[in-house]
Image (spheres, helix red, strand yellow):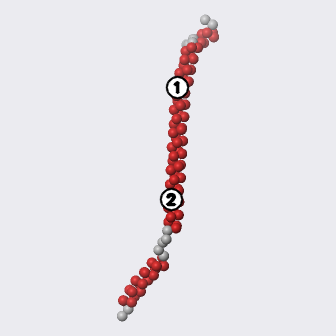
Amino acid sequence: MCGWRKGLQGIGSSRQAETLDGVQIVAMSVQIAQLTSALADSERRKVAEQQSMSATVQQIKEQVLNLAHRPTTSSLEDTDDNSEEEEDDFVDATP
């Protein structure tokens, strides 16, 4: 047997090689499809998460604006009430 033929022994026919290549191509195609699907799912989740965060931020902004525009009781009124009570205490304590 020639040297180059002896080196080809065990490799098999080109048909076997094509079959193996075809199987590998199919397996890789399936893997690519799975990875593409997983990536699309990940992107959808990311977009949904960003939309949810934006909605939450908007709600917080609205709450802050509502609090800023809400009428509040004056701190002077609270102080006046406290000072009256304190004055009463001093009046009662004086002989």
Kindly identify the residue that appears in the image at 52 percent across and 25 percent down.
27
Residue beneath the point at 39% across and 86% down: 88
Measured from the top left, where is residue 74 in percent x and y? 48, 76
Q: Among all residues in the image, which is located at the extreme top?
A: 1
The residue to which callout 1 is attached is 27
Q: Which mark is residue 45?
A: none
Q: Position of residue 29 (x, y in %)?
A: 55, 27
Q: Is residue 33 shown above or below 69?
A: above
Location of the N terminus by quadrant is: top right
Query: Residue at coordinates 51% horizontally, 36% vertically from top-left?
Result: 38
Q: Residues within 10 Å of mark 1 (few under 14, many from 20)?
A: few
The kind of secondary structure element at disc 2 is helix
Q: Which residue is mark 2?
A: 60
Mark 1 residue element? helix
Q: Position of residue 61 (x, y in %)?
A: 53, 60
Asked if 34 appears above or below 15 in the picture, the reply is below
